[in-house]
Amino acid sequence: MKITRSVSRVSAQEIAPQDRPLSLSFGVPEIDGHLAGGGLRLDAIHEFLPEDFTARAAAYGFLTALIGRLMRQGTGPVIFCDFQRRTADRLLPFGPGLMALGLDPGRLIHVQSASETDFFWSLEEALTCSRPLAVIGIAGETSLYDFTESKRLNLRAHRQGKPLFLLRAGETAGATACASRWRIGALPGARPSSQAGQSRRGFFLPPLGDPCWRLSLVRAQGSRPQAWPVRWDHETLRFHLAAPLAARTIGDPDRAPVRRTAGS
């Protein structure tokens, strides 16, 4: 599959270099102020790793919300390159879920690779294209991604002025040429702002609690390691610092507790 040909079909989303933002902030002063430059460079690789296997979906959700934030700052499509060996554990984009996290699925180009070689080739080709706003890589267990491969991709990203957000499998990672590396863990969700479901852009969003993550900066150029509890607000489509767990109210305080008897 020719990625260049696929991207050219999105002719209405032509993007000029001056329309590209130079950095991506989280919108949280405590995090942005900690990072050199006030955000993530948009001409480099940024790696995201789950804290453990059970946190893979949480890391995927956080990255989705972050890319949605980038989409609201610039125009053009985003290329989503995917290589995951185990189909039972595959993380796949789901339209209503993407929209709930602020990402427009109409601007997403999904490229599935059958092999590691094809996957890294698709990443390089995607970074070479002029129209995409960013490139996402969902990497399963791979042996080809090392310092040399990351250096090649990082140079390509820098030359094209385009970011590569790479979600990696596994709890550990060796040395690479990434500009930043983050570890994502799942936290209990915050209480929803309303008990009724919401209808947004043609789909119904049930009254779920706002997702929360433990965002840990492992390494970044000019910044020290640090961790923050982060909450996603479905209504404003923004990140916020999450309240400490002990300060949260579980359930609806206006409702009396339901007492159940045996057999009920």
Image (cartoon, helix red, strand yellow):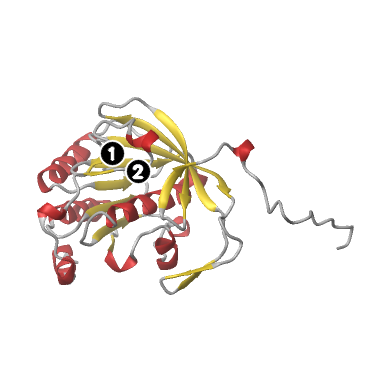
Q: Position of residue 83 (x, y in %)?
A: 32, 55
Position of 262 with respect to 243 (left or right) is right
Residue at the farthest right position: 262
Q: Position of residue 158 (x, y in %)?
A: 14, 42
Camera-side residue of 134 and 68: 68
- What residue lies at 33% left-to-right and 32% top-to-bottom? 33
Camera-side residue of 243 and 47: 243
- Dot 1 corresponds to which residue? 39
Q: Quadrant of the N terminus?
A: bottom left
Q: Of label 1 and label 2, which has the lower sequence position?
A: 2
- What residue lies at 44% left-to-right and 62% top-to-bottom? 97
Residue 216 sits above or below residue 118 on the image: above
Q: Position of residue 217 (x, y in %)?
A: 38, 33
Q: Position of residue 71 (x, y in %)?
A: 28, 57
Camera-side residue of 165 and 101: 101
- Separation of marks 1 and 2 at Cα, in angstroms: 7 Å
Which residue type does callout 1 highlight? Gly
* Secondary element at image label 2: loop
Are discs 1 and 2 less than 8 Å apart at CB? yes
- Dot 2 corresponds to which residue? 26
Q: Give residue 112's quadrant in the image.
A: bottom left
User: Would you say residue 63 is visible in this rendering?
Assistant: yes
Residue at the farthest bottom position: 202
Which residue type does callout 2 highlight? Phe
How packed mark 2 is, by other alpha carbons closer than 10 Å (few <14, some 14-19, many 20 or more), is some
* Secondary element at image label 1: loop
Q: Give residue 177's quadrant in the image.
A: top left
Residue at the farthest front position: 254
